[in-house]
Amino acid sequence: MTAFHESNRRFPAPADHRSAEDWNSLLEHQADVTLADELTLFQSTPEWLAARSVIDAGCGNGYFLSKIAAYFPEKDYLGIDISPELIDLARRNHPRRTLIAGDYFTAAPGRAEIVLMRFLVQHLSDFGAVLRRSADLLLPGGALVIVESDLARSQILPQPRTFLAMLVEHQRVSALSGSVRTRLLAAADDLVRSTCEPWRLVATRETTTAKAGPFAGSKLLAVFRFWVDLAERSGTFAFDFDAVRRDLAQWGEQEAACVSLATRMFVLSPERG
Ligand SMILES: C[S@@+](CC[C@H](N)C(=O)[O-])C[C@H]1O[C@@H](n2cnc3c(N)ncnc32)[C@H](O)[C@@H]1O
């Protein structure tokens, strides 16, 4: 069974790409950009509101986990991440939180009423394995909550064409190497059915975050630049990455620049026999 898709093999080791501190700021900025709107998704999810315990699978540096725990303090949270460097950061940033360095598919974090996967599925290729593992870890009545950004439904204007072309190419290569994100976003019901696991898709929700530029010096532009660096360092496709950086720098200066970023949440539940 392979849980990662090819381009993900190096992903969890920040030392391969940049320092752990760089990862720390990427994950913080990335969460901050859409956090307020994502919270409305959680606020309108009955399974989430009712749950008393949460496993955050692929919690990274624990930043998003700490934010969501601050908004919903009545729950018990446990974070697990395969990257020891990111778990070290998470422990430093949030010393009182329960955090495990390990693979979600093999570690033993205990059971919970919710398994949360924010931006993890994009790194995985075997959705059947995700459902089987989550069925083992969920308490009766529990749900798997997947959150992913949906770039196909997002807008970046005026279009930074080279950057957008790079994102399209990245998604094409990721889909070819098995990432399930594209299939999940395009047809979640079909994806669940095709796994032949006894699960159902309970709900799909979407929110968008709109922001107006100029973006020079902003967290959003820092996140976009980091994506370019990651794409280049992944070595999975050839591109003129310096042209993308120039394109983004020009876009960031434009008074009329604006973005609308779509985020989707999928709520799934196992059907117990
Ligand atoms: C894009 S980051 C998202 C981090 C965090 N959830 C957030 O929203 O900021 C994806 C995380 O998943 C972790 N990861 C990838 N595969 C994993 C696995 N099999 N088990 C646990 N964590 C995994 C990576 O190390 C990385 O920290």
Image (cartoon, rainbow, N blue to C red):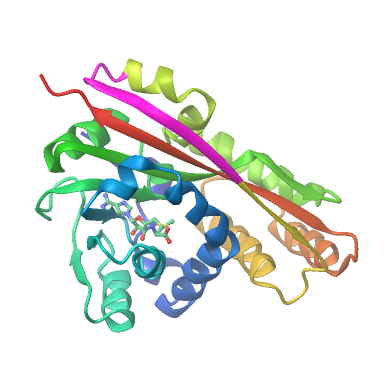
Please provide percent x and percent y for residue 237.
Answer: 57, 45
Q: Which residue is drawn at 42% across and 33% down?
A: 180
Is 259 in front, or is 234?
259
Q: Which residue is farthest right?
A: 255
Considering the image in quadrants, where does the C terminus appear?
top left
Q: Quadrant for ligand 1?
A: bottom left
Is 182 in front, or is 171?
182
Considering the image in quadrants, where does the N terminus appear?
top left
Q: Residue at x 51, y 46 (%)?
A: 236
Q: What stretch is highlighted in magenta?
A: 195-207
Quarter assignment of residue 207: top right
Is 29 in front, or is 240?
29
Is 156 in front, or is 11?
156
Left or right of 207? Residue 124 is: left
* Image height of 128 relative to 97, above or below: above
Please provide percent x and percent y for residue 6.
Answer: 39, 42
Left or right of 211? Residue 33 is: left
Quarter assignment of residue 128: top left
User: In the image, is residue 112 part of the stretch drawn in magenta?
Assistant: no
